Image (spheres, helix red, strand yellow):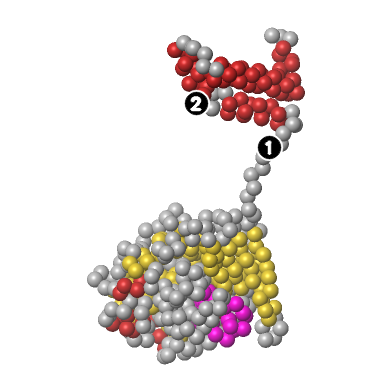
């Protein structure tokens, strides 16, 4: 044994010995099979052995193969197989020019599963989201245009960063530190989505992230822009991960007290962009309360959803109750209201705000957020005049929005019970995180 030990310690000799042993094992195994196949009479013990050999592929075959392969690899005769994994990538392409000649780019985030998200630096706009159905077929589930010109001239906030204050402010006015500020009135008698030239109509600076598959968009809204006080430095980050989650993170600081409410305004149709309706989608909104409004969509009270067509605490078909004779549905021309997000939070500090599913395709989108509300807009002003990516018109309620945010008209509800503050001070950092998780069932 003392003479064999040095030979066994040598990797080359050890590998050769393993191969010889394997050859011997294979020969014995082959001989046993010949005996059994020839119909020889064997004892009960032999029958059990035969049964083990014939049925138990792991007894000699798989174990021997593993050792045999390991020996060949140690000798350099065979290379280990490499597992192929699709890369997560960020690519950039041209998407036209502004009237002044400035080039607009589209950034495409792709994950290892084949999911991809296209985002423009104009407005930080989500142009497309390709998600798989239950059969693995990818379709774009985000409404939008195929040309920059349409975004410039026609867009009803498709996919954009909405700010400085998303949603409505009554009569475009609010008081802050004893001073009244007058904003643009661009939605009837009210201010909507940041004014005449909100965040959706600006070119944002971009930076590709070094660690995650994502893009950071940034811009500074100067003091007085659209009537808002304070110079507001903003950045919005889009990340696509291998859990098929589109993560949106917002951050902002100011040099003066101001109001802020940033969100993303993507229109979804899980049947695929260009499908005729979202009324066949099922929606779950865990919140037990919603923000009731007047006929101009300005909040009047926080009300219970119980016994109303606003109760989505269990899955409900969107089209089932949207035409009911209910005052709030008349005011919104359908659903255009904010639901309160429940207080239960996951390990990331986010609450489940909504789940949307389409039974025909199997696609599901779950939304998690740290915001107090989620605005469900059922595409009540789409009228078939806009032609989308795929060349099809966007008919009434062929897309819908689920926008995480604070409540409408919060600047005029400061300090009221149940209303989260929208005031940002110079020593504070505004943050907002929302996750859109796509799957199929």
Q: Circle 2 sits on which residue?
A: 55
Q: Residue at x 52, y 83 (%)?
A: 386
Q: In terms of depth relative to the viewer, which is nearer, 29 or 281?
A: 29
Direction from residue 232 to residue 440 in the image, left or right? left
Is residue 261 one of those drawn in magenta? no
Q: Is residue 164 above or below residue 181?
A: above
136, above or below 373, in the image: above
Comparing 87 with 224, the one in front is 87
Per the picture, the main secondary structure of the magenta-coloured stretch is loop
Residue 154 pos. (x, y %): 55, 85
CB under 8 Å between callouts 1 and 2?
Answer: no
Q: Position of residue 77 (x, y in %)?
A: 74, 31
Q: Is residue 157 rendered magenta in the image?
A: yes
Whether residue 424 is visible to the viewer of this picture, yes or no, is: no
> For the residue labelled by badge 1, is the local secondary structure a helix, a strand or a loop?
loop
- Quickly name the residue at label 1: 80
Residue 73 visible? The answer is yes
Residue 58 rendering spot, x and y as whole percentages: 54, 27
Query: What is the magenta range?
Result: 143-165
For the N terminus, the image quarter is top right
Residue at the (31%, 64%) spot, across then down = 313
Q: In the figure, is residue 331 to the left or right of 26?
A: left
């Amino acid at each position: 044994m003392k003479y064999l030990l040095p030979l066994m310690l040598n990797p080359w000799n050890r590998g050769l010995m393993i191969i010889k042993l394997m050859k011997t094992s294979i020969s014995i195994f082959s001989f046993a099979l010949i005996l059994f196949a020839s119909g020889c009479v064997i004892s009960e013990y032999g029958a059990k052995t035969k049964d083990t050999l014939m049925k138990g592929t792991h007894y000699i075959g798989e174990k021997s193969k593993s050792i045999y392969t390991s020996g060949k690899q140690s000798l350099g005769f065979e290379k280990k197989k490499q597992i192929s994994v699709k890369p997560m990538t960020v690519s950039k392409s041209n998407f036209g020019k502004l009237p002044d000649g400035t080039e607009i780019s589209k950034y495409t985030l792709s994950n290892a599963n084949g999911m991809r998200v296209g985002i423009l630096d104009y407005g930080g706009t989500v142009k497309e989201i390709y998600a798989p159905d239950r059969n693995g077929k990818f379709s774009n589930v985000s409404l939008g245009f195929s040309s920059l010109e349409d975004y410039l001239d026609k867009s009803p906030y498709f996919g954009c960063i909405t700010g400085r204050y998303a949603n409505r402010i009554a009569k475009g006015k609010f008081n802050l530190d004893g001073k009244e500020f007058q904003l643009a009135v661009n939605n009837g008698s009210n201010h909507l989505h940041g004014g005449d030239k909100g965040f959706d109509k600006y070119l944002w600076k971009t930076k590709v992230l070094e660690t995650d598959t994502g893009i950071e968009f940034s811009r500074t809204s100067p003091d007085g822009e659209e009537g808002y006080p304070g110079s507001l430095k903003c950045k919005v980050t889009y990340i696509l991960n291998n859990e098929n989650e589109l993560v949106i993170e917002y951050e902002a600081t100011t040099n003066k007290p101001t109001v802020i409410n940033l969100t993303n305004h993507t229109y979804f149709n899980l049947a695929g962009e260009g499908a005729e309706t979202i009324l066949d989608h099922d929606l779950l909104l865990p919140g037990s309360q919603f923000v009731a409004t007047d006929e101009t969509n300005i909040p009047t009270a926080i009300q219970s959803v119980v016994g109303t067509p606003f109760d989505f605490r269990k899955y409900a078909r969107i089209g089932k109750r949207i035409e009911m004779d209910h005052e709030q549905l008349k005011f919104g021309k359908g659903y255009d209201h904010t639901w309160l997000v429940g207080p239960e939070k996951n390990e990331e500090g986010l609450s489940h705000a909504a789940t949307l599913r389409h039974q025909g395709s199997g696609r599901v989108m779950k939304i998690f957020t740290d915001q107090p509300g989620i605005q469900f807009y059922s595409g009540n002003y789409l009228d078939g005049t806009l032609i989308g990516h795929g060349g099809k018109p966007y008919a009434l309620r062929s897309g819908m929005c689920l926008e995480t945010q604070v409540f409408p008209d919060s600047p005029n509800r400061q300090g009221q019970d149940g209303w989260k503050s929208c005031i940002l001070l110079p020593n504070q950092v505004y943050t907002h995180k929302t996750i859109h998780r796509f799957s199929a069932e």
